[in-house]
Image (tube, helix red, strand yellow):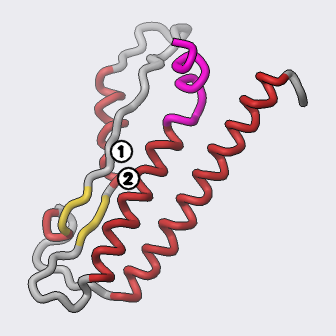
Amino acid sequence: MIKSMIFDRTKLPILAEGMDAQHLKQRAVASNIANVHTPGYERKVVDFEVELQGAVNRHREQVTRTHPGHLSSNRTIQAKPVMRTANDRIDSPGSEEIVIEREMANLAETQIKYEAEAKLAKQHFDILKMAIRGTG
């Protein structure tokens, strides 16, 4: 109960989901790089942004504000990253070959996003530590 009161009311759950998504993206990209010359291998992708946008849209449909002075819903939006083959994507019909330069760029982008989310999470923990210790 105390855990949910402290952590669930911060941005930490969102940051944790984002870090999980970046981790899954790194696994997909690493798999693509490792299998660049494997015959029949299908490129893996993680579309967390697409999943998140879908979850936000579903959340908007469920929440109706009946009066301008009322608060909106405080329920969290649930979106889980999913790894799939690139051929399963709606915007990518047909076979998609692995381009090592694109994969390396994706790897770098994913690393930067992960590090940024980790830095923000650390800042939130530092703020919580200051509040607990009564310093600052």
Q: Amino acid at mark 2?
A: Glu
Q: Is residue 4 magenta?
A: yes
Give the image location of residue 99, x and y in percent. 31, 87
Determine if the magenta segment contains residue 10: yes
Q: Dividing the image into 4 quarters, which one contains the C terminus?
A: top right
Local crowd size for mark 2, using a 10 Å CA cut-off: few (<14), some (14–19), many (≥20): some
> Which contiguous range is marked in magenta?
1-13
| Mark sitting on residue 25 | none
Q: Is residue 10 left or right of residue 100?
A: right
Seen at 48% across and 17% down, the residue is 72
Between marks 1 and 2, how big is the CA–CA gap? 6 Å
Give residue 53's quadrant in the image: top left
Locate residue 135, reporting x and y percent. 89, 27
Q: Is residue 51 above or below residue 56?
A: below
Q: Residue at x 44, y 17 (%)?
A: 73
Left or right, 122 with respect to 133, comes to left
Residue at the outermost front position = 133
**Residue 102 relative to residue 35: left or right:** right
Q: Position of residue 62 (x, y in %)?
A: 30, 21
Near-viewer residue (59 or 16): 16
Tag 1 residue: 53
The answer to whether marks 1 and 2 mark residues whose Cβ atoms lie closer than 8 Å is yes
Binning the other alpha carbons within 10 Å of mark 1 as few (below 14), some (14 to 19) or many (20 upward) gives few
- Toward the bottom, the furthest residue is 37
Q: Please give the label number shown on residue 49.
A: 2
